[in-house]
Image (cartoon, rainbow, N blue to C red):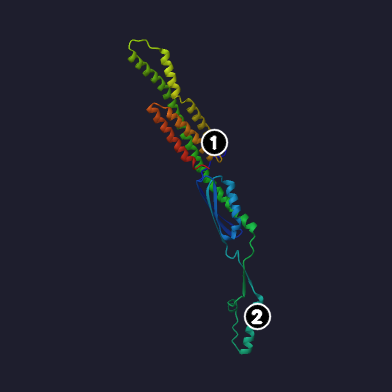
């Protein structure tokens, strides 16, 4: 089962691979599209695109920041060798100083090691392909941690959206029931008003039925509530399907708000109007939550 995921998340991994300690951190916040920024040492700058592709394979939407640091084990990236020719030259010159000038013969390793260019310090050529593979292995572990957090938050969002959807369904049922009662109340008021005005004159029942039918058609919200329920069912189906449904939910919320607004414009009863306001408040809370869904 594919769960929905939050766009907000954090993941971290620290691994030592082939003598280097890699630390990878990922942080993300809401965004309309995927925006990935990678900050890494110059020595692995060539791997930036590969890191972005790894993130893109796991993330569809959000502003993702990736931070990478690398520490090499002591001497792992350094090779020191003895410059034999230079040492031989120094020794020959020192022997000549002793024999020619009678200088004290105190030649030692410590003396030679302090002389210029006795040692050659080399940094071995980096195997970029291997280094990139090592880095990506740690990036993938950080992504696993990052995705686990997003999935946990996604599960909480899923539960909250379904709960609010059920609340809206209950409110819609109240509107439907109240709307039917509104028509009945209107007919009763109309009859009473006619009896009051016409006194003993016979009342045309067909006229009352016609007026009531016109009023019922004017305030009917059946089409709107049916579509609203259908949209709520679609929302549940999207949540069940999982994956990157954030944008689809955004569009669906626009449609639900449209139906709620139309329903509100048709409600002549103050109590029903208040219920519609409650529906809109729940829809706004759902909209705020969907802004965080990938």
Residue 132: image location, x then y, percent: 62, 56
Label annotation for residue 179: none
State which mark lies toward you, 1 or 2: 1
Residue 125: image location, x then y, percent: 64, 63
Mark 1 surroundings within 10 Å by alpha-carbon count, few (fewer than 14), some (14 through 19), many (20 or more):
some
Disc 2 is placed on an element classified as helix
Q: Is residue 194 left or right of residue 25?
A: left
- Looking at the image, residue 183 lies above or below residue 96: above
Residue 127: image location, x then y, percent: 65, 60
Residue 58: image location, x then y, percent: 58, 46
- What is the quadrant of residue 111 in the picture? bottom right
Question: Which residue is more in the foreground, 245 or 76?
Answer: 245
Disc 1 is placed on an element classified as helix
> Circle 2 sits on which residue?
89
Residue at 40% from the left image edge and 28% from the top image edge: 272
> Circle 1 sits on which residue?
238
Q: Is residue 290 visible?
A: yes
Mark 2 surroundings within 10 Å by alpha-carbon count, few (fewer than 14), some (14 through 19), many (20 or more):
few
| Earlier residue among tags 1 and 2 | 2
Location of the N terminus by quadrant is top right
């Amino acid at each position: 089962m594919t769960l929905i995921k939050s766009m907000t998340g954090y993941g971290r991994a620290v691994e030592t691979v082939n003598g280097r300690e890699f630390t990878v951190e990922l942080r993300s916040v809401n965004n309309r599209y995927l925006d990935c920024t990678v900050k890494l040492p110059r020595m692995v700058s060539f791997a930036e695109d590969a890191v972005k592709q790894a993130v893109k394979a796991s993330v569809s939407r959000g502003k993702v920041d990736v931070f990478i640091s690398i520490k090499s084990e002591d001497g792992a990236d350094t090779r020191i060798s003895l410059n034999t020719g230079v040492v031989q030259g120094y020794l020959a010159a020192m022997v000549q100083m002793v024999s020619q000038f009678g200088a004290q013969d105190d030649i030692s390793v410590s003396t030679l090691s302090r002389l210029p260019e006795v040692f050659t310090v080399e940094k071995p050529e980096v195997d970029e392909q291997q280094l990139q593979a090592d880095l990506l292995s740690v990036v993938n572990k950080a992504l696993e941690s990052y995705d686990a957090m997003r999935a946990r938050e996604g599960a909480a969002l899923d539960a909250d959206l379904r709960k609010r959807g059920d609340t809206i369904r209950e409110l819609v049922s109240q509107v439907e029931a109240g709307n039917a009662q509104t028509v009945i109340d209107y007919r009763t008021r109309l009859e009473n008003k006619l009896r009051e005005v016409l006194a003993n004159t016979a009342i045309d029942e067909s006229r009352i039925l016609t007026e009531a039918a016109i009023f019922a058609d004017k305030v009917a919200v059946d089409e709107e509530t049916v579509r609203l329920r259908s949209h709520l069912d679609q929302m549940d189906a999207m949540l069940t399907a999982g994956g990157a449904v954030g944008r689809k939910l955004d569009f669906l919320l626009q449609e639900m708000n449209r139906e709620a607004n139309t329903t509100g414009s048709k409600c002549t009863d103050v109590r029903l109007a208040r219920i519609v306001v409650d529906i809109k408040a729940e829809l706004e809370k759902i909209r705020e939550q969907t802004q965080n869904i990938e």
